[in-house]
Image (cartoon, helix red, strand yellow):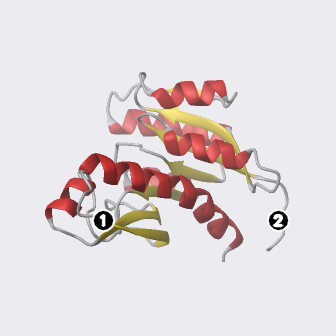
Amino acid sequence: MEKFLGKKKISILISGRGSNLKSLIKYSKTKNSLIKIVLVISNNSKAKGLKVASKSKVKSKYIKYLNKSNFENRSLKLLKKHKTDLVCLAGFMKILSKNFIKKLSKPIINIHPSLLPKYKGLNTHKRAIENRDKFSGATVHIVNDKLDSGKIILQKKIKILKSDTEKSLERKILKIEHKIYPLAIIKLLTNH
């Protein structure tokens, strides 16, 4: 593995329960982790992920989503102040503008609960079941200005069983997400 100096500073944007945040925090505390989580930003004051961050003693900030440019400008200031090397979206339910991506000028990655390019956007499990797909899974990709369309870093697929419901499929895919998000970060940071 390529050597690089110090841990990379990661900031995470969330909107919800923070289960991927929890798995990234867990990875960040492992002995050979390549990352240090310096900031969690949420656009939702009731996001359970804010409690996850607080319990783990990770600095977190709620920024009210008045409009896209206000939220993005305030987020950019914080991300730069914390010298963020990489931004991870973990259940962040807003689309970032081309301007934000350009101004940040650091990689932004996202985890998505489908085998992209299939089922961009929402209701991925429902769509996979309704279409009688044999497989589904999760994808970590680079964020660009088009929804769920950036370069794929890592994907993992699982079989959809006849007995699967939206809920059971969601639970199975979430477990995969928790495994592959840290692996994708390692792959990105070590260029493997």
Q: At label 1, which amino acid type do we have? A: Ile
Which corner quadrant of the image does residue 79 belong to? top right
Q: Using residue 127 as the reference point, say whether residue 138 is left or right of it.
A: right
| Location of residue 74 in the rendering, given as x and y in whole percent from the top left corner | 50, 33
Query: Residue lying furthest front in this view?
Result: 163
User: Which residue in the structure is indicated by mark 1?
Assistant: 160
Q: The N terminus lies in which quarter of the figure?
A: bottom right
Q: Position of residue 41 (x, y in %)?
A: 52, 34
Distance from the alpha carbon under mark 1 to that under mark 2: 40 Å
Q: Viewer-proximal residue, 78 or 170?
A: 170
Mark 1 crowdedness (10 Å alpha carbons): few <14, some 14-19, many ≥20: many
Quadrant holding the C terminus: bottom right
Q: Residue furthest left?
A: 130
Q: Residue furthest bottom?
A: 192
Residue 141 percent location from the top left of the image: 46, 65
**Does 88 sit above or below residue 134?**
above
Q: Is residue 68 left or right of residue 88?
A: left
What mark, if any, has residue 4 been given in the picture? Answer: 2
At x 15%, y 67%, the residue is 131
Residue drawn at the location 45% of the way across and 56% of the way down: 111
Residue 105, given in percent of the width and then of the height, sits at 56, 58
Q: Is residue 105 visible?
A: no
